[in-house]
Image (cartoon, grey):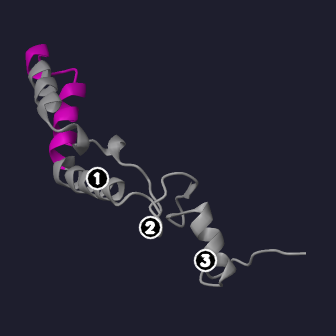
Amino acid sequence: MAKVSAVEKNERRRKLVARDAAKRAALKAVIKNRDLPIEERFKATLKLAEMPRNGAKIRIRNRCEVSGRPRGYYRKLRMSRIALRDLGSTGKVPGIVKSSW
C-alpha cells in the first residue's frame, strides 16, 4: 500500500490540472503563435510561469487504483502488476487466469 499522503497529493494535482487546463491551453496557444508580437508572447510566458506548477498535466503520476503503487502500472487496467496478479488469482478480473503447471 502506498502512502496515503502521496495518493492524496496526486489527487490534488489532478484537480488542479482539470481546473487550469483551459487557461494553460490558451496561454500556450498565444506563446506558440508566431504571428503575434514578441512582447505579447513574452507576457503570456510570464503569466504561464506564475501559475502553479502542479497544474501542469505532466506532474500527474499514474497510480494503481487498488493499492496506489506508482510503478508497474498497466494503463489499460489502471492498476499495478501486483494488484492485477492478486485479483486475477482470486478470479475477480474477467478473462485473466493465473497459469500453473
Compared to 93, does 22 lie above or below?
above
The rendered magenta stretch, by its main secondary structure, is classed as helix
Q: In this view, does 76 lie to the left or right of 13?
A: right
Describe the element under mark 1 as helix, strand or loop: helix
Q: What element carries label 2?
A: loop
Which image quadrant is residue 54 in? top left
Let me know if residue 30 is in the magenta part. yes
Instruction: Kindly report the distance in space between the C-alpha atoms of the residues bearing marks 1 and 3.
Output: 26 Å
Residue named by callout 2:
65
| Type of the residue with mark 2 | Glu
Q: Is residue 41 found left or right of 97 in the rendered image?
A: left
Q: Tag 3, which secondary structure?
A: helix
Label 2 near label 1: C-beta < 8 Å? no
- Neighbour class for label 1 at 10 Å: few (<14), some, many (≥20)? few
Q: Please tell me how crowded label 3 is: few (under 14), some (14-19), or many (20+) other residues with Cα within 10 Å.
A: some
Give the mark toward the camera: 1 or 2.
Answer: 1
Picture coordinates of residue 45, whole percent (x, y):
16, 25
Specify whether 85 is left or right of 77: right
Question: Is 35 left or right of 79, judged from the image as shown?
Answer: left
Q: Give the residue drawn at x 65%, y 83%.
A: 90
Please say if the residues under marks 2 and 3 sit with CB atoms less than 8 Å apart. Answer: no
Give the residue type that dot 1 points to: Lys
- Residue 40 in percent (x, y) is at 8, 21
> Which quadrant of the structure image shows residue 8?
bottom left
Start and end of the magenta stretch? 22-40
* Residue under the image location 20 percent in, 26 percent down: 31
Residue at the image point whose x is 27% and y is 41% from the top: 56
| Residue at numbered disc 1 | 9
Q: Which mark is residue 87?
A: 3
Residue lying farthest to the right in this orientation: 101
Q: Residues within 10 Å of mark 2 (few under 14, many from 20)?
A: some
- Percent position of residue 98, x then y: 75, 75
